[in-house]
Each structure stands twice: as structure tokens, then as C-alpha cells.
Amino acid sequence: MNSNGNNGDYRTLDKLINGDNNTSNDKSMWLIPYTFGDNHYIYIDFKTIKEIKGIWIYNYNKSIEDTYRGTKSILIRVDGKLMTPKWGVVVKKSLGLSFDSFD
């Protein structure tokens, strides 16, 4: 992440799938540099065939004020095949709070 001026930022890619989902601790979250008008991609290679039964998306949840930083919509492709409508799926904005019963 050094090439994008993010040296020392702890919101690194390893937080994307770390199991710490219901949190408002930004040290457990992933955040990318956002460039308006650009597409932003995540590629996951499982290396072997996996059965996927569902995907939960936890949006950026640092605080009520920072929930605008989360994603607005996503497209999901599996092996090149579009799994969502071509216009994407709207991702609900987070609450900015953590609740034990919410996860």
C-alpha cells in the first residue's frame, strides 16, 4: 500500500475477511483509497473449488459520521459469470454502532 500514499495505514486488505464483523473499531476494518469515477475491484481466488452458499457484506461502520465512506453498491462475478443484476446490488449503509444481537 506504500505506492498509494497509505504507508502506516492499518486498514489493510487482511481485514477484509478476518471474522471480526460486528465492530466499529476501524483497526478491524478495510478501507481503500477511493478515486471518484473509477471502478474499484476485489478479486478472491480460493485456489480450489469451493461451494458458496451465501455472502454477507458488512459495510464500513467506524462511526455514525463515517458510514458514508462505505460502499453503495456491488457487482459479484463468479468465474466470470455475473451473479447480481447488471446494475448491481445496493448495500445498506451501516449503523455506525455495534450491537451484539446485530451480527
Image: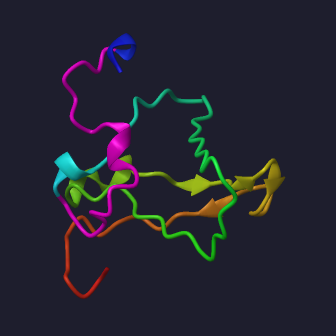
- Relative to 98, say whether 19 is above or below: above
| Extreme residue toward the front, this view | 48
Q: Quadrant of residue 39?
A: top right
- Please say whether residue 31 is visible from this viewpoint: no
The region drawn magenta spans 5-24
Answer with left or right where residue 34 lies relative to residue 90: left
Answer with left or right where residue 26 lies relative to residue 82: left
> Where's the C terminus, which quadrant?
bottom left
> Where's the N terminus, which quadrant?
top left
Q: Quadrant of residue 31?
A: top left
Which SS type dominates the magenta stretch?
A: loop
Residue found at x 19% / y 57%: 63
Q: Where is residue 94 in the image (x, y as percent from the top left)?
A: 35, 66
| Extreme residue toward the bottom, this view | 101
Residue found at x 19% / y 60%: 24
- Relative to 52, say whether 42 is above or below: above
Count of numbered labels shown in the rendering: 0
Q: Position of residue 62 (x, y in %)?
A: 22, 55
Task: Say whether residue 30 is magenta.
Answer: no
Q: Position of residue 5 (x, y in %)?
A: 31, 14
- Relative to 75, say whether 52 is above or below: below
Task: Say whether residue 22 is magenta.
Answer: yes
Q: Where is residue 92 in the image (x, y as percent from the top left)?
A: 47, 68
Q: Nearer the viewer, residue 13 or 87?
A: 13
Residue found at x 24% / y 18%: 7
- Please say whether residue 98 is visible from this viewpoint: yes
Residue found at x 22% / y 61%: 64
- Relative to 35, say whether 15 is above or below: below
Q: Which of 71 and 30 is in front in this view?
A: 30
Q: What kind of colouring is applied to the model shown? A: rainbow
Q: Which of 88 and 44 is in front in this view?
A: 44
Q: Quadrant of residue 14?
A: top left
